[in-house]
């Protein structure tokens, strides 16, 4: 027997039983983004490796350790996108969409990072990414955060904590970085291996360490918010005041630094306690320098990305999902000779009633087996297309979830008869007369 093929570790199938939750999440998200004026954009899953190196930063974990990079047949180094912001910035530049224009964009799709898989952390995972390009003021930051908060409310997801911070300008961050490095060097002997490695390349990430032994050292570290330049401080204060004004709860976390290098000023994250260590369900921030850094016109921007698997898991746990869809009608076919005629009738009904969900019994089977399938399908009504009935120019209908008898209708009146039977069944406690 040949060996059974397995999926790649950390890359999941989304099965039909789970797809309802995904679609519910996607529909709510799309509707809300549209109502805030965001437009969908679709960018390639593969980009030049150079794009991610320049945008995300060579010393980040994402670029240094996690990218799926390969050389294509033309000899180019390409990478499966680890996130969407870089690709969207590239698309705005290469399609000539900047020149002072403003854009509110979103996209959904799979991202790829070679991390160690565990619950809530995958190597292929989906993000809904949202970007507001062209505005520098804290009003955009506040609206974006309000949008996220409203989405959790609409989805019925509670218990998320919003953490925000300001990273200031690249200059103030550089100054802070020097102070932090000085502090950490004084305690170098107690740094864990990961932090030792980060000390020269990316010391701010040490503040993000989950190692309990590092927490005391981190608590004593100088705080970024104390070293902000005056404009960044003003920006942050206005944002906090605006959020308070619109009733959005948040916590200032001076150690929130984010793992991608392109951020400046506002950064934020929604955290849940329920998915263990993988607790960030949506994260983002301002990246005013990125577009110019990639060769475009200097354009301020801010955005965030949600981890779809993590949010779908919360949605499912909250039990706030719509009931799974079932067919309206299951068509039982009695007699092998009538299979072609049954399909013809069903196709006619599909043309007449495009919104009706109809499941036609395919592949034969005796009457009993077909009714078992009909029951399992969840349809409220069965249509029976039989040789005898067709000879008389009629088809039969039978409610499946009520104890009432069979009725018949002329083949030529099938569509209105199905409408009437379904309307009656939709009323609690009633069934069509037998
Ligand atoms: P990020 O924090 O790297 O930011 O990822 C955003 C979200 O994606 C996380 O909060 C998490 O929910 C989810 N996520 C990340 N890695 C994984 C994983 N391995 N498995 C499952 N879910 C994961 C960004 O990607 C930025 N591009 C966000 C952004 C947009 N900033 C500005 N605009």
Image (cartoon, rainbow, N blue to C red):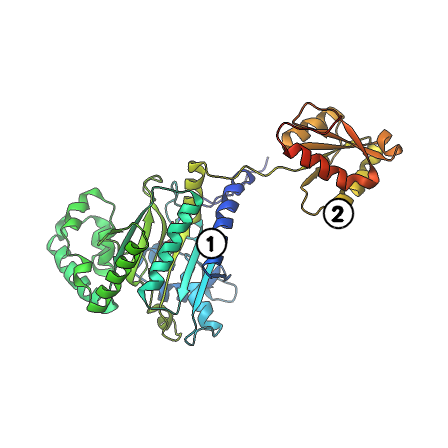
Residues at discs 1 and 2 in contact (Cβ within 8 Å)? no
Rendered image quadrant of residue 338: top right
Residue 235 coordinates in the image, percent (x, y): 26, 65
* Structural distance between the alpha carbons of marks 1 and 2: 33 Å
For disc 2, the marked residue is 352
Label 1 SS: helix
Asked whether, in this view, residue 89 is left or right of residue 223, the answer is right
Where in the figure is residue 316, as x and y percent of width and height?
45, 38
Residue 428, percent from left and from top:
61, 30
Query: Which residue has dot 1 on it?
Result: 32
Q: Residue at x 74, y 27 (%)?
A: 433
| Residue nearer the viewer, 419 or 341 | 419
Q: Is disc 2 placed on a helix, strand or loop? A: helix
Q: Nearer the viewer, residue 180 or 189?
A: 180
Taking the view exactly as shown, the residue that stands out farthest to the top is: 403
Q: Residues within 10 Å of mark 2 (few under 14, many from 20)?
A: few
**Image quadrant in which the C terminus is located:** top right
Q: Is residue 265 above or below residue 416?
A: below
The quarter holding residue 304 reads bottom left
Instruction: Give the label on residue 135, or none.
Output: none
The residue closer to the viewer here, 194 or 321, is 321
Q: Residue at x 33, y 65 (%)?
A: 287
Left or right: residue 131 versus residue 417 is: left
């Amino acid at each position: 027997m040949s060996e059974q093929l397995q999926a790649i570790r950390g890359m999941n199938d989304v099965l039909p039983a789970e797809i309802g939750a995904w679609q519910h999440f996607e529909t709510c998200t799309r509707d809300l983004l549209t109502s805030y004026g965001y437009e969908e954009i679709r960018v390639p899953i593969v980009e030049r490796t150079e794009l991610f190196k320049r945008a995300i930063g060579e010393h980040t974990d994402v670029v240094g350790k996690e990218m799926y990079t390969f050389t294509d047949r033309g000899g180019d180094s390409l990478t499966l996108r680890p996130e969407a912001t870089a690709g969207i910035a590239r698309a705005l530049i290469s399609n000539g969409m900047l020149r002072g224009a403003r854009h509110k964009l979103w996209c959904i799709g799979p991202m790829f990072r070679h991390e160690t898989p565990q619950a809530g952390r995958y190597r292929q995972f989906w993000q809904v990414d949202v970007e507001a390009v062209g505005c520098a003021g804290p009003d955009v930051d506040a609206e974006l955060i309000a949008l996220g908060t409203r989405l959790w409310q609409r989805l019925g997801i509670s218990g998320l904590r919003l953490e925000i911070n300001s990273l200031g300008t690249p200059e103030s961050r550089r100054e802070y970085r020097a102070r932090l490095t000085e502090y950490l060097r004084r305690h170098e002997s107690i740094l864990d291996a990961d932090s030792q490695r980060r000390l020269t390349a990316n010391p701010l990430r040490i503040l993000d360490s989950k190692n309990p032994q590092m927490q005391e050292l981190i608590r004593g570290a100088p705080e970024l918010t104390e070293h902000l330049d005056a404009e960044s401080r003003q920006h942050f204060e206005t944002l906090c005041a605006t959020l308070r004004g619109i009733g959005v709860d948040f916590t200032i976390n001076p150690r929130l630094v984010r793992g991608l290098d392109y951020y400046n000023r506002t950064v934020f994250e929604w955290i849940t306690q329920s998915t263990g260590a993988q607790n960030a369900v949506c994260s983002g921030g301002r990246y005013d320098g990125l577009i110019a850094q990639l060769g475009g016109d200097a354009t301020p921007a801010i955005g965030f990305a949600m981890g779809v698997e993590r949010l779908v898991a919360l949605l499912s746990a909250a039990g706030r999902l719509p009931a799974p869809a079932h067919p309206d009608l299951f068509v039982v076919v009695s007699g092998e000779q009538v299979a072609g005629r049954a399909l013809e009738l069903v196709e006619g009904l599909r043309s007449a009633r495009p919104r009706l969900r109809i499941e036609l019994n395919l592949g034969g089977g005796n009457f009993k087996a077909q009714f078992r399938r009909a029951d399992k399908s969840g349809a409220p009504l069965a249509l029976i297309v039989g040789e005898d009935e067709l000879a008389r120019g009629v088809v039969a209908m039978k409610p499946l979830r009520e104890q009432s008898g069979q009725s018949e209708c002329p083949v030529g009146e099938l569509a209105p008869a199905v409408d009437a039977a379904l309307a009656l069944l939709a009323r609690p406690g009633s069934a069509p007369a037998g």
